[in-house]
Amino acid sequence: MACPEVLQNLLEFVPASSLSTWGIGGTVRYVSKPKNLDEVLESFKFAKERGLPILPLGNGSNLLFDDEDFLGIVIKVNADYIPMRIDGDRLFVSAGKMLASMARYARQHGCYDYDYLATIPGAVGGSIVNNAGAFGREICDRLLSVMAIEIKTQRLLNIPRSEIEFAYRKCSLRGTHLVLGAEFQFRESEDEGFSSMNLYRKSTQPLKFPSAGCVFKNPPGNSAGKIVDEAGLKNLRVGDAVVSDIHANFILNMKNATAENVKELVSLVQDRVFRETGHQLVREIQYASEAVISL
Ligand SMILES: Cc1cc2nc3c(=O)[nH]c(=O)nc-3n(C[C@H](O)[C@H](O)[C@H](O)COP(=O)(O)OP(=O)(O)OC[C@H]3O[C@@H](n4cnc5c(N)ncnc54)[C@H](O)[C@@H]3O)c2cc1C
């Protein structure tokens, strides 16, 4: 339901299931989709005045909403916050743009360096904050700078790559900044074959049921999926949440899985893997409560 008299581009009572790829969760009280800096700042003001926590969100492809309602404000930066453009050797893109659109745009202009990102169903901002990666690359590799609001001070910053710490699926901006846009290196390059990456994914990942991709981080030099598989946990099930039999690092929502089902299954897998192999699997996916920020 739109609520234009309070704030531009604000929605109320949005099912969390429509905001995340797992398709799970209660109702979100407010969702703001700011198109410009004024609307971003208005969203913060709106939250502050009402004592609401905020939750920055991209495509919700790495996040599990709770079954309970979220009584705060989700901020989803609009895909056109910064119109996508190439300027010399730089590519500018909004935090709300999907990686696939960015990769397609780069490709149309002769740059195939971002093809690997097209296979990840995230938005640019969420993917920077997660340092998403695939096929041996990470989004930070060709990042030049990030435009962001520092949440504590609400200052607009242009942060060079050198001032941001990245590690495997980790970035120092998480929980402290709202990413608005980014600048990447652009150069014409050889075709690296998106279609073969896509085919590889389709043959190795269970893409027919809702999920959030890999649930656990890969331990150094190992594969979490292989470890879960070797512990014999494929098809382990709690309610409608099940460990995929195609890729054991995926937990699928077979139809009506709840967040509690998923959380219980995650703990069960961690316990059983630890008992049987000694590995302590660390979650890659985030629970919404861990992403909520109080102003
Ligand atoms: C089928 C499938 C395959 C996948 N394959 C991969 C893969 O190969 N590699 C990989 O790395 N991941 C993969 N993922 C996981 C996921 O797609 C990535 O982590 C993706 O980068 C998350 O982006 P998002 O926009 O969906 O982030 P979200 O899930 O929306 O958010 C993730 C985190 O970022 C924060 N956040 C979101 N937007 C912003 C913002 N603008 N500013 C500040 N914080 C923000 C959120 O609060 C949250 O903490 C896969 C997921 C699925 C469903």
Image: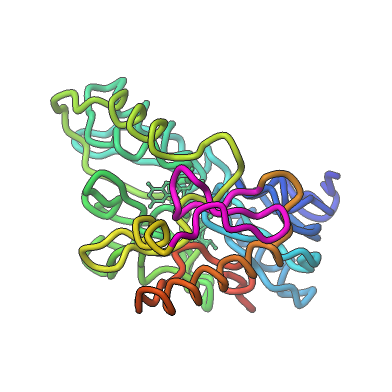
Dominant SS of magenta comes to: loop
Question: Taking the image as drawn, is residue 288 in sight?
Answer: no
Residue at 36%, 67% (x, y): give it. Answer: 171
Residue at the (54%, 54%) spot, across then down: 243
Q: Quadrant of the N terminus?
A: top right
Which residue is at a point 40% across and 74% down the rendered structure image? 276
Quarter containing the C terminus: bottom right
Q: Is residue 94 above or below residue 234?
A: above
Q: Depth check: 242 or 105 in front? A: 242
Provide residue 25's location: percent of width, then percent of height.
Answer: 74, 57
> Quick check: 229 above or below 89?
below
With 277 as the anchor, is 291 left or right in this view?
Answer: right
Q: Could you say where residue 101 lies in the image, as x and y percent from the top left? A: 43, 31
Q: Does residue 161 appear left or right of residue 211 in this picture?
A: left
Seen in the picture, residue 162 relative to 180 is either above or below; the reply is below
In the displayed structure image, the side of residue 41 where residue 269 appears, left or right: left
> Of all residues shown, which one is farthest toward the left?
190
Q: In the rendered image of this protein, does residue 48 appear above or below residue 182? A: below
**Magenta stretch: residue 25 in it?**
no
- x%, y% of residue 12? 82, 53
What percent of the width, then of the height, locates residue 106?
A: 30, 29
Can residue 261 be spotted in the picture? yes
Please tell me in which quadrant of the rendered image residue 221 appears. Answer: bottom left
Name the residue nearer the viewer: 292 or 109: 292
**Tag count in the figure?**
0
**Colouring style:** rainbow
234 within the magenta span: yes
From the viewer's side, name the closer residue of 273 and 31: 273
Region in magenta: 232-253
